């Protein structure tokens, strides 16, 4: 029996050590988050979700880890130790974790950690692709910061150390070089950012380790209850193409299983991650008739919830609250806006949870003089009920 157990231990040692190395690399690269090896979840392929008792929608994060945590705390989803305490709440993060900030990887690891913690108590954290995720997989780094490049270089160092450690173990197959196939020269790239750009390409190219581990788990269009979520917006042609097809094609491209996705889906001004027809600050500039037609083609859909376009007035709704815009530019790399999140509660309806001091000390009552069903416009004379929560 002892000999059998010893043989079993020896046989498992490479796998155990490989798992340990992955966990060690995760901890080092994420700023101190221990994650077990990646797991596959059926929700990664799910497009339509049932209506939860409580739903939270969080807008663009753009590399600002502190604001990310503040947004989750606003909604009572994490405690002082940054652990999930949101119970069975469903969260949708609308995309654009990447670019404009220097803590993109920390946010990706953090969201992955919360997914695992929420799942244990019947909660759900759904992450989505924004135009900036698509741009990075496409090697479009116009909005990358030097801090962001450095974060990826730091990650790559630990990733390569982990690969070398694995190769010292008997029974572990040879690990592909992170930089395999990446050119040593890029026309027009400045020398001081060359290593960072090369590392970012290696990590985020189709089938790259960061792209495959994190971005491939994102959805591009989903329906939760009676709400449709998409980063930019949807047109009838997108609905007719099929949300499952959109999600599958984007995932397959990110995983390196197929060539580039159609321009109509993720590139160009009328694609699902770039559209702004329903996001202009003023309602008169929004195409409400098209929006109503689109929603009418989606069974049970009452509203479309979008990010992508910064709303300086905060989260707001137009077109009879059929378009709800939740990008408040909270990242320091954008407008450094105050964190706000959208709550859809089965009993309380739609509310904005905000850290804006305007709504402290009982001032919220004056904004509720003309209450409307749903969200309404975030304007003093027409505003919805605001709920201020201390960060």
Image (cartoon, grey):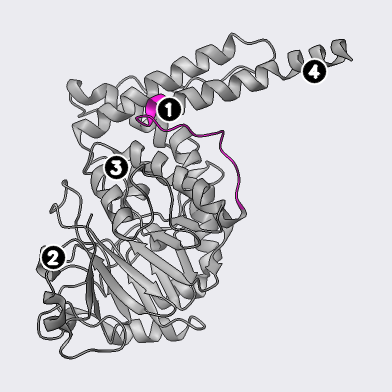
Tag 1 residue: 27
Nearer the N terminus, badge 2 or badge 1?
A: 1
Between the residue at mark 4 and the residue at mark 2, the CA separation in whole angstroms equals: 61 Å
Where's the C terminus, which quadrant? bottom left
Please, what secondary structure does the residue beneath circle 2 have?
loop
Are discs 3 and 1 less than 8 Å apart at CB?
A: no
Magenta region: which residues?
28-41
Choose mark 4 or mark 2, whichever is in front.
4
Q: Position of residue 88 (x, y in %)?
A: 50, 62
- Say which quarter of the image contains residue 236: bottom left
Nearer the N terminus, badge 3 or badge 1?
A: 1
Tag 3 residue: 140
Nearer the N terminus, badge 4 or badge 2?
A: 4
In this rendering, would 155 be left or right of 368?
A: right
Please, what secondary structure does the residue beneath circle 3 have?
loop
Between the residue at mark 4 and the residue at mark 3, the CA separation in whole angstroms equals: 48 Å
In this rendering, would 311 be left or right of 95?
A: left
Could you tell me if residue 33 is visible in this image?
yes
The numbered disc on residue 312 is 2
Are discs 3 and 2 less than 8 Å apart at CB?
A: no
Q: Position of residue 275 (x, y in %)?
A: 30, 67
Dot 3 crowding, Cα within 10 Å, few <14, some 14–19, many 20+: few
Dot 4 crowding, Cα within 10 Å, few <14, some 14–19, many 20+: few
Nearer the N terminus, badge 4 or badge 1?
A: 4
């Amino acid at each position: 029996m002892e000999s059998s157990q010893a043989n079993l231990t020896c046989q498992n040692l490479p796998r155990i050590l490989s798992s340990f190395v992955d966990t060690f690399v995760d901890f080092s690269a994420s700023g101190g988050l221990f994650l077990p090896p990646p797991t596959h979840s059926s929700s990664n392929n799910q497009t339509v979700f049932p209506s939860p008792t409580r739903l939270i929608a969080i807008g663009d994060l753009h590399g600002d880890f502190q604001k990310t945590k503040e947004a989750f705390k606003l909604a009572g989803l994490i405690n002082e130790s940054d652990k999930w305490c949101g119970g069975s709440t469903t969260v949708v993060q609308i995309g654009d974790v990447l670019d404009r900030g220097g803590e993109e990887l920390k946010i990706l690891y953090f969201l992955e950690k919360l997914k695992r913690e929420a799942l244990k108590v019947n909660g759900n954290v759904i992450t989505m692709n924004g135009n900036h995720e698509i741009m990075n997989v496409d090697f479009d780094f116009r909005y990358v910061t030097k801090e962001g490049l450095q974060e990826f270089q730091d990650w790559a160092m630990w990733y390569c150390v982990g690969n070398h450690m694995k190769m010292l173990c008997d029974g572990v197959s040879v690990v592909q070089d992170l930089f395999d196939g990446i050119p040593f020269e890029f026309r027009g790239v400045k020398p001081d950012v060359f290593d960072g750009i090369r590392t970012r390409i290696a990590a985020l190219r189709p089938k790259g380790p960061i792209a495959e581990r994190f971005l491939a788990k994102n959805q591009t269009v989903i329906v939760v209850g009676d709400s449709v979520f998409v980063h930019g917006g949807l047109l009838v042609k997108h609905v007719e193409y099929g949300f499952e097809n959109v999600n599958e094609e984007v995932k397959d491209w990110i995983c390196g299983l197929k060539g580039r996705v159609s321009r109509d889906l993720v590139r160009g001004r009328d694609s699902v991650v770039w559209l702004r027809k329903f996001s202009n600050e003023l309602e008169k500039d929004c195409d409400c008739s098209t929006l109503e037609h689109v929603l009418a083609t989606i069974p049970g859909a009452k509203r479309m919830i979008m990010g992508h376009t910064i709303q300086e007035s905060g989260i707001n709704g137009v077109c009879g609250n059929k378009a709800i815009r939740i990008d408040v530019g909270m990242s320091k790399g954008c407008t450094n806006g105050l964190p706000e999140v959208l709550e859809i509660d089965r009993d309380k309806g739609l509310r904005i949870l905000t850290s804006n001091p305007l709504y402290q000390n009982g001032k919220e009552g004056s904004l509720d003089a003309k209450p409307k069903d749903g969200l309404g416009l975030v304007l003093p004379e027409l505003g919805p009920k605001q709920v201020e929560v201390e960060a």
